[in-house]
Image (cartoon, rainbow, N blue to C red):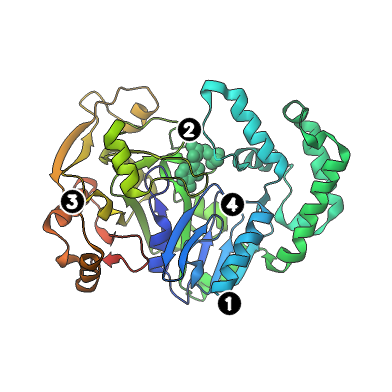
Amino acid sequence: MIKLILGLQFGDEGKGKITDFVSNEKSILVRYNGGTNAGHTVVTDKGKFKFHLLPAGSLRAKSVVLGNGMVIDPAAFIDELKEIQKENLSLDVRISSAACVVTDMHKYIDREQEKIRGDMKIGTTSHGIGPTYEEKYSRNSIRIGDLSDLGIIQRKLKLIREIRYSEIKNSPYMNDDELMKMAANLHRTWETIGKYVCRTESFLMDAVKKHEDMIFEGGHGSLLDIDFGTYPYVTSSNTISGAMHTGSGVSLRKVDSIIGVVKAYTSRVGEGPFPTELHGTEAEELRAAGGEYGTTTGRPRRVGWLDIPLLRYTAELNDIDQLAITKLDVLGSTKKIKICTSYGKNVINPINALLGKEKPEPQYIELDGWGNLSDEEIQQMIKRGYSSLPEKMRNYVETVEKLVNIPVSIISIGQIRGSTIQKN
Ligand code: IMP
């Protein structure tokens, strides 16, 4: 069975928890886009685990693959690997030789570009993601496979420095010693990661032929897609389903099921349009209840109501088969929960509204909250399944199902690993 799991909002939908839920000891988990700008937390009885590069189910999977579509900071990868190998001793790790390398120079450029943008800033994670993808498409990037060769790293760094002179003229990297130190540090990472590096597409194509259990996990959310998201307030990779093919080599036609992950409300980090955003006390309460602070940057996330026009758009774009709704427990304390069902009669295309071409006037329906659930109640509900959930919560789930017109198959009602329920 091959599953593709991706987020339908602005990222942070809780994809990690869903990957962890659907994976098992036989799974091969694959990431195919982005880098350490993604982040997810999994809470198990052993504690809280934060991942940025490795897929969330790595705690128990058979293999993990970081595909060619990713941009990888080798030092960050080594740190995560050390953590995960303490928990999953037999984990088989593969990293694509064609993935591009994020260097400290690219993180510097990311920060500088944000300064120059001024009030047009994107609010990036400063992890060097955009500049590394720029390098990839100008065909000057250091790729993971290059890390074995100090000479290539040195030549590429010098080339990048020359081409990007105006961006880095005031940086420490103008100094040759600094640049060569960075080259040596990058090369040194090969000692640790070299044994994991291969043409991952061959491994994955073989696994498809052998009918292995595979889960592809998309980074970020569909509305951060470089083409279909709220440009320019997006990340620098494609985040929709098609990116899986270009970012891993495995055709989308091989996928049995595409699961769209939706948080029960909406959140967004960084700049950009957000029609259902809440402000003031209402926002503070929801942010606190949901612990909405970035896993990657610690920034407070902007929060708001669920946005059906956008969900319909991203569900169609990704050709979603089933929905997973997360963080339903968080909404419990809210007495009246709103869902935006339309942007008003003047908006024809919701994404145009987000790009400022049409003016959204969000129309809401109101549903009753189901109250706070105690840990014990949650435990009981997990044991008894969907029908034991409070009626008002089921009403919320089934309303979303009807409005988006896609079945909800997975429901998450708590932070801990086990608090996820299969609906059908
Ligand atoms: P970048 O990906 O660091 O270039 O940041 C571009 C925008 O995407 C910023 O608004 C980030 O906050 C946002 N972003 C990137 N990755 C994620 C994610 O995984 N979750 C939420 N926001 C993200």
State the residue in front, 256 or 276.
276
The quadrant the C terminus occupies is: bottom left
- N-term mark: 4 or 1: 4
235, above or below 373, in the image: above
* Camera-nearest label, 4 or 1: 1
The residue located at (30%, 31%) in the rendering is 280
- N-term mark: 1 or 3: 1
Identify the residue under disc 1: 89
Mark 3: few/some/many CA within 10 Å (<14, 14-19, 20+): some
Residue contact at pointers 1 and 3, CB within 8 angstroms: no
Relative placement, left or right, of 259 versus 38 is: left
Amino acid tagged 4: Gly
Q: Of helix, strand and loop, which one carries label 4?
A: loop
Mark 4: few/some/many CA within 10 Å (<14, 14-19, 20+): many
**Disc 2 residue lies near ligand 1 with CB under 8 A:** yes
Amino acid tagged 2: Tyr
**Disc 4 residue lies near ligand 1 with CB under 8 A:** no
The residue located at (77%, 28%) in the rendering is 170
The quadrant the N terminus occupies is: bottom left
272, above or below 224, in the image: above
**Residue 359 picture location, percent across and down:** 30, 22
Q: Quadrant of residue 92?
A: bottom right
Residue contact at pointers 4 and 1, CB within 8 angstroms: no
- N-term mark: 4 or 2: 4
Identify the residue under disc 2: 233
Amino acid tagged 3: Tyr
**Residue 136 picture location, percent across and down:** 67, 43
The residues bearing labels 2 and 3 have C-alpha atoms spaced at a distance of: 30 Å
State the residue in front, 37 or 2.
37
Identify the residue under disc 4: 69
**Disc 3 residue lies near ligand 1 with CB under 8 A:** no
